[in-house]
Image: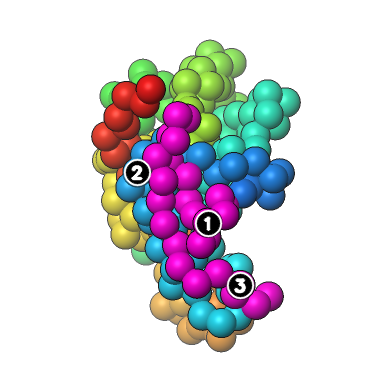
């Protein structure tokens, strides 16, 4: 796709801040104006478009895609997204442990036990550890607790957390990022314990490395959107 605009900008409007491509307002996939809650978010998205060459690389517009999803999300889509995110706690990465070998088990314990302890302190409930393939049953109150947490997210938080849980396989890790217990580097590291162990024993291959790089950029974008959404939100008249 050819780049057909010369410059980008940001304009304040009654509902927030819009991104401009020349004089045109950037729109979501659903053709809604991409009206954003904070100026830093709008400027970061404008920067994505400003950094494009003569040919648009739409795969690099990660913040734009996440924000567009939030802008377009209706009540039914929100309910589905909440359910999808909350469900991760039932099979959460950090609660599923290998039976062996011992050094992998030790790596998992060192990386994931502190996160389960943090979740217990932060939310009064945490998923149970299970060893092997089959998940350990969690009580209904634990699932309800995390569903209530997810229901409290605003739209930008929700799409960010949905991306984080998808990349990491863990609602606990995603919530730790949301609560600023983990930064992007640490979140990526603890989500890659199994993969790092596998690579240390078997090596890596280009296809796996490419896939991993894409997922890492997806994680970075989700964390960045959380940060931009957290930026001071002015009172807009």
Q: Nearer the viewer, residue 103 or 117?
A: 117
CB-based contact (under 8 Å), mark 2 and mark 1: no
Which of marks 1 and 3 precedes in the sequence? 3
Name of the residue lying farthest toward the top: 141
Q: Which residue is mark 3?
A: 4
Task: Verify whether residue 19 appears in magenta.
Answer: yes
Where residue 80 appears, as percent x and y from the top left, is 69, 30
Badge 1 marks a residue whose secondary structure is: loop
CB-based contact (under 8 Å), mark 2 and mark 3: no
Residue 205 visible somewhere in the drawing: yes
- Give the residue at x 72% y 26%: 76
Tell me if mark 3 has few (under 14), some (14-19) or many (20+) residues whose alpha carbon lies within 10 angstroms of its own: few
Q: Which residue is mark 2?
A: 39
Which of marks 1 and 2 precedes in the sequence? 1
- Classify 228 as above or below 141: below
- Give the residue at x 55% y 16%: 144
Nearer the observer: mark 2 or 1; the answer is: 1
Q: Quadrant of the N terminus?
A: bottom right
- Give the residue at x 46% y 77%: 199
Badge 3 marks a residue whose secondary structure is: loop
Tell me if mark 1 has few (under 14), some (14-19) or many (20+) residues whose alpha carbon lies within 10 angstroms of its own: few
Which of marks 3 and 2 precedes in the sequence? 3
- Classify 88 as above or below 111: above
| Distance Cα–Cα, label 2 vs label 1 | 18 Å
Q: Which residue is mark 1?
A: 23
Where residue 114 appears, as percent x and y from the top left, is 29, 41
Query: What residue span does the magenta drawing correspond to?
Result: 1-26
Where residue 139 appears, as percent x and y from the top left, is 56, 18
Nearer the observer: mark 3 or 1; the answer is: 1
């Amino acid at each position: 796709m050819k780049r057909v605009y010369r410059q980008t900008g940001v304009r304040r409007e009654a509902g927030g801040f819009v991104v401009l491509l020349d004089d045109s307002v950037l729109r979501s996939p659903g053709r809604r104006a991409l009206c954003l809650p904070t100026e830093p978010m709008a400027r970061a998205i404008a920067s994505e478009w400003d950094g494009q060459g003569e040919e648009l690389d739409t795969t690099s517009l990660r913040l734009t895609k996440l924000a567009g999803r939030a802008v377009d999300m209706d009540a039914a889509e929100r309910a589905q997204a909440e359910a999808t995110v909350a469900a991760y706690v039932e099979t959460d990465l950090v609660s599923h442990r290998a039976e062996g070998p011992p050094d992998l088990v030790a790596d998992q314990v060192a990386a994931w036990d502190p996160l389960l302890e943090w979740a217990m302190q932060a939310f009064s409930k945490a998923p149970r550890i299970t060893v092997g393939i089959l998940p350990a049953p969690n009580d209904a109150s634990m699932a309800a607790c995390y569903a209530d947490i997810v229901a409290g997210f605003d739209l930008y938080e929700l799409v960010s957390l949905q991306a984080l849980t998808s990349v990491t396989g863990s609602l606990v890790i995603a919530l730790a990022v949301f609560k600023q217990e983990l930064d992007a580097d640490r979140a990526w590291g603890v989500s890659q314990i199994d993969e790092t162990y596998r690579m240390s024993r078997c090596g890596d291959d280009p296809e796996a490395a490419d896939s991993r790089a894409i997922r890492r950029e997806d994680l970075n974008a989700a964390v960045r959107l959380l940060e931009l959404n957290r930026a001071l939100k002015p009172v807009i008249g």
